[in-house]
Image: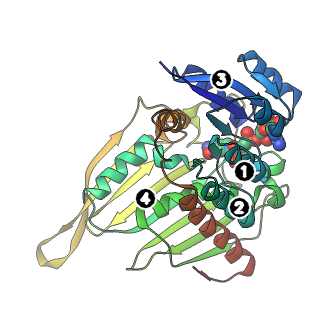
Amino acid sequence: MKKVGLGIVGLLGHAGSHLKICEKLKDVKFVAGCDKSAAGRKRGARAGMTVYSDIKEMLKHEKLAAVIISTPNFTHKDISIACLKAGVKVFCEKPMAHTLADCKAMAAAANKYKGFLQIGFELRTCPVMLHIKKMVDGGAIGEVKNIHFFQTPGLKKKGWKLDPKRSGGLFIEKLCHQVDLFRYFLGEPKSVQVFMAQNTVPSYGIMDNCYAVLEFGKGRLAQISFLSGLAAVKKGMKNSDYSKMGHGLRFDFIGTKGSISYNYWEKSVSVTKLVKEKGGSHKVALVSKKIFKNLTPEELYENLVFQDTDFIRRVKEGKKENFSGADSLKTMQVAFACEESAKKRKKVLL
Ligand SMILES: NC(=O)c1ccc[n+]([C@@H]2O[C@H](COP(=O)([O-])OP(=O)(O)OC[C@H]3O[C@@H](n4cnc5c(N)ncnc54)[C@H](O)[C@@H]3O)[C@@H](O)[C@H]2O)c1
């Protein structure tokens, strides 16, 4: 069986998870790895790769079919474009990049070199999300009129992710996933407005408490409530402790005939329907509540396995990206509009 000759740029942190997953994929042959840090290169060498500290050197000396880029956001543009120029198929972690100019340059390079540029908006390969999308497309809740995303995450340690100049900000580094998902379900938004409360966590350089409203036309909205400073942590916490400690992660889809609610920490998907009663009133009736007790976090949300498997399969079969670089640029344009709206404290039309 012909294997995909793979390179990995970034070998620690999130890249370490990509590496672990790809080590198990039978269609992959690791060729080379690149990391600025000696610890990263040591990890790559352990996986049997030739390691480099500079992407240009790696591309000069190695023949790669595909590459996974999982380095900080502010490095994505240069690394992706160098790979596209060398004819290597690219999977680049989300966000596309930390500035809109860099995102545009990446999409333009994919176009210029007729390249393969897959951005890691993982919710589009998440099994639970795909299950919900199928229900929605099958008309289970009528026309979707509102999608609400609610998250109370744990705090991040100081580093480039909390520095807007290097990460791009909250909507670029983190909430681009949700912006992308809204586009996946509802199409292109017409406007965005972000209301940002004064930050409460002193070490945060990015927004830490905010509310966003995206208007999609035809009476459809998507909303984000993102509240840091609520979820507590304790040593040795188990997955089952998270919701008790204030961690929340939930998507609600409200349609003209019913709703679907996905609660990550509860591992549940609930479906309701809107029922007309005698006298003209309505009530909401619970149709089903499925607890996915046996699904792993990977299958529920953090689906790197599905994402990496899909990427490798597409490369191997000579297929196109799951969604193009140009499509990812559209998600990034909306995410940057959210950042702009928060800063200017006004609605931004798209
Ligand atoms: N679920 C998700 O979608 C998800 C989760 C976490 C991180 N990410 C994304 O993955 C990327 C990496 O995040 P992270 O948390 O692992 O960051 P990190 O800073 O912890 O690690 C990045 C790795 O890249 C290496 N590196 C830095 N600059 C480099 C360069 N120019 N060339 C080669 N190697 C370089 C570092 O030495 C390190 O090993 C980011 O874009 C982040 O947004 C996505």
The CA span between labels 2 and 3 is 28 Å
Locate the C terminus and report the quarter of the image it occupies: bottom right
Are the residues flagged by discs 1 and 2 in contact, CB closer than 8 Å?
A: yes
Q: What residue type is labelled 2?
A: Ala
Residue 234 appearing in the image: no
The answer to whether residue 209 is left or right of residue 185 is: right
Circle 2 is placed at which residue position? 105
Give whichever of 155, 297 is nearer the camera: 297
The CA span between labels 4 and 2 is 35 Å
Name which of mark 3 and mark 1 comes first in the sequence. Answer: 3
Give whichever of 285, 150 is nearer the camera: 150
Q: Is mark 4 on a helix, strand or loop?
A: strand
The CA span between labels 4 and 3 is 40 Å
Q: What residue type is labelled 1?
A: Ile
Residue 231: x and y in percent read: 66, 48
Are the residues flagged by discs 4 and 2 in contact, CB closer than 8 Å?
A: no
Circle 3 is placed at which residue position? 30
Q: Nearer the viewer, mark 4 or mark 3?
A: 3
Quadrant where ligand 1 appears? top right
Circle 4 is placed at which residue position? 252
